[in-house]
Image (cartoon, rainbow, N blue to C red):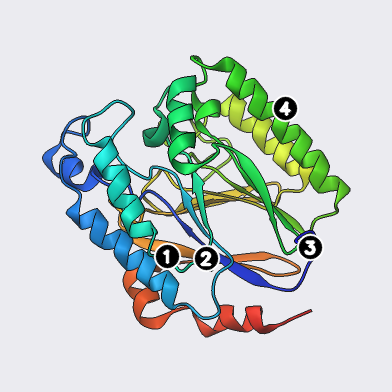
């Protein structure tokens, strides 16, 4: 049933609730300073309350990685995960949650064990799903960043991705949209590699594959700032964090409207979304049934 286009819809994208980073960043100890996350709990609660009030309801709420700050094996990790789950379970039952793995969730250099632990807690590290004729792919971007300790898992994801893109072509889907934690790039497709994007040769290969498959947009987080750009018609959308901000943006969420022709998105501060909801222009797009 979900293979069929049924008219415009929207979803909510959030990123980096990252329970523990605000304190760690404030005290200048990002390895051990994450022993408090009261501020992040409040922000995540505000995000859930804002989403629950929206009318019409979004099709789903996707969190693009770094759910918590504590890396695998660190002291506060289990408590951070439990506190986030306690907040998220108040999300309206009719709004499915979609989780994307980030570097803090599975480690900068993931292993089979760290990925298995993530999967037990949050679900698969990569998967696909359909909503109203649109094909969504969730990827484990850490396997592109550094798969040196689990090369066979990167190979498995690569094979799976090729299979999924063949499925998308067969079903003649309306759009293909990708979610991953680490952006391909922040502003320009040929920018230098650093912590916040993927290595250039890896990036080029993925961008070309996505372009050939007709993928319209990639949504990510990781940067704790809003950014983005284009590669041959493929839009890279980088959303700032629900949690700790590392730039001038505010704690927020992105509203993404999917129409017959295009994908339109806007970043809202949590305060804006809580008090005003979605702008009329986006609501009008949703009202236009085909």
How far, Cα to Cα, is label 1 from label 4?
34 Å
Is mark 1 in CB contact (under 8 Å) with mark 2?
A: yes
How far, Cα to Cα, is label 3 from label 4?
26 Å
The secondary element bearing badge 2 is classed as: loop
Is mark 3 in CB contact (under 8 Å) with mark 4?
A: no
**Mark 3 highlights which residue?**
1
Q: In this view of the protein, which residue sits in the foreground, 236 or 287? A: 287
**Mark 2 highlights which residue?**
95
Q: Nearer the viewer, mark 3 or mark 4?
A: 3
Visible residue check, residue 250: no
* Residue 208: x %, y % from top left: 72, 36
Task: Answer few, some or many: residues within 10 Å of disc 1's Cα (few below 14, many 20 plus, some between 14 and 19).
Answer: some
Q: In this view of the protein, which residue sits in the foreground, 129 or 206? A: 129
Is mark 1 in CB contact (under 8 Å) with mark 3?
A: no
How far, Cα to Cα, is label 1 from label 2?
7 Å
Which residue is rendered at x = 49% and y = 47% of the image?
99
Task: Answer few, some or many: residues within 10 Å of disc 2's Cα (few below 14, many 20 plus, some between 14 and 19).
Answer: some
Is mark 2 in CB contact (under 8 Å) with mark 4?
A: no
**Mark 4 highlights which residue?**
159
**Could you tell which of marks 2 and 4 lies nearer the N-terminus?**
2
Visible residue check, residue 127: yes
Location of the N terminus (image quadrant): bottom right
* Residue 252: x %, y % from top left: 37, 62
**Mark 1 highlights which residue?**
91
């Amino acid at each position: 049933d979900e293979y069929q286009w049924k008219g415009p819809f929207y979803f909510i994208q959030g990123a980096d609730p990252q329970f523990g980073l605000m304190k760690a960043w404030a005290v200048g100890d990002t390895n051990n300073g994450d022993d408090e996350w009261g501020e992040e709990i409040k922000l995540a609660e505000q995000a859930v309350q804002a989403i629950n009030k929206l009318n019409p309801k979004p099709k789903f709420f996707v969190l693009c990685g770094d759910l918590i700050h504590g890396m695998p094996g660190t002291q506060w990790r289990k408590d951070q995960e439990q506190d986030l789950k306690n907040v998220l379970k108040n999300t309206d039952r009719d709004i499915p949650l979609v989780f994307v793995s980030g570097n803090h969730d599975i480690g900068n250099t993931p292993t089979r064990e760290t990925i298995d632990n993530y999967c037990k807690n949050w679900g698969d590290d990569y998967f696909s799903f359909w909503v109203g004729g649109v094909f969504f792919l969730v990827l484990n971007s850490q396997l592109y960043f550094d798969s040196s300790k689990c090369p066979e898992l990167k190979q498995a994801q690569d094979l799976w991705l090729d299979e999924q893109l063949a499925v998308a072509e067969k079903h003649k889907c309306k759009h293909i949209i990708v979610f991953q934690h680490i952006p391909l790039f922040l502003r320009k497709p040929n920018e230098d590699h650093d912590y916040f994007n993927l290595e250039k040769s890896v990036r080029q290969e993925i961008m070309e594959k996505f372009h050939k498959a007709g993928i319209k947009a990639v949504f990510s987080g990781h940067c704790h700032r809003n950014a983005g750009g284009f590669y041959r018609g493929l839009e890279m959308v980088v959303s700032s964090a629900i949690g700790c901000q590392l730039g001038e943006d505010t704690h927020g969420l992105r509203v993404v409207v999917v129409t017959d022709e295009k994908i339109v998105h806007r970043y809202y501060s949590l305060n804006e979304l809580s008090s005003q909801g979605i702008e009329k222009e986006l609501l009008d797009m949703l009202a236009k049934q085909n």
